[in-house]
Amino acid sequence: MINFGYKINTDRQIDLNHCDRRIANFISKIEPTFNTCIACGTCTTTCTAGNFTNFNPRLLYTLVKRGQIDEVKKEIEKCMLCGKCQLACPRGINTRHIILNIQKALEKLEKNEI
């Protein structure tokens, strides 16, 4: 076949109907403020880990809501649990509690308890 210098890219579309939302449902039951996040980015701007790595709490919450578990596992390891994001949040979201429960949900997911 002739190579014209082009290739077909893989589809980057996220099918939300087939995503695993077990972690998001688990967190919503324990911490209802998780659903009030408006993704303003204040948590990301104050994040200590974000200054040293490419950690982004807003991205983490979005990945959880989308059900992208593999990406959540990679992202959550970067959090230092300092709590600055919780202090800066204009909606009063308990971000530390959410992140701790994401970790707990990931452990339960590995054991098939969720």
Image (cartoon, grey):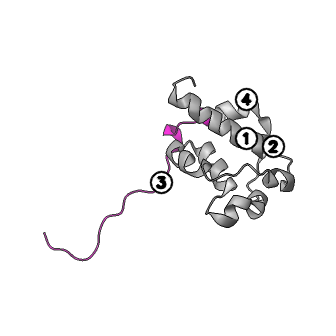
Name the quadrant of the N terminus: bottom left
Query: Where is mark 1, residue-wise?
Result: 98
Q: Is residue 8 above or below residue 83?
A: below
Question: Reading the chain from its start, which is encountered first: label 2 or label 4?
Answer: 4
Q: Which residue is mark 2?
A: 94
What residue is disc 4 on?
29
x, y percent for residue 73: 55, 45
Q: Residue furthest top?
A: 113
Which one is in front, 43 or 21? 43
Instruction: Single out the mark in the foreground, 2 or 3.
Output: 2
Residue 42 has which mark? none
**Camera-nearest label, 1 or 3:** 1
Residue at the spot x=76%, y=44% of the render? 96
Which of the two discs, 1 and 4, sits closer to the camera?
1
Q: Pointer 3: what residue?
A: 13
- Residue stretch rendered in magenta on the structure: 1-23
Q: Amino acid at mark 1?
A: Ile
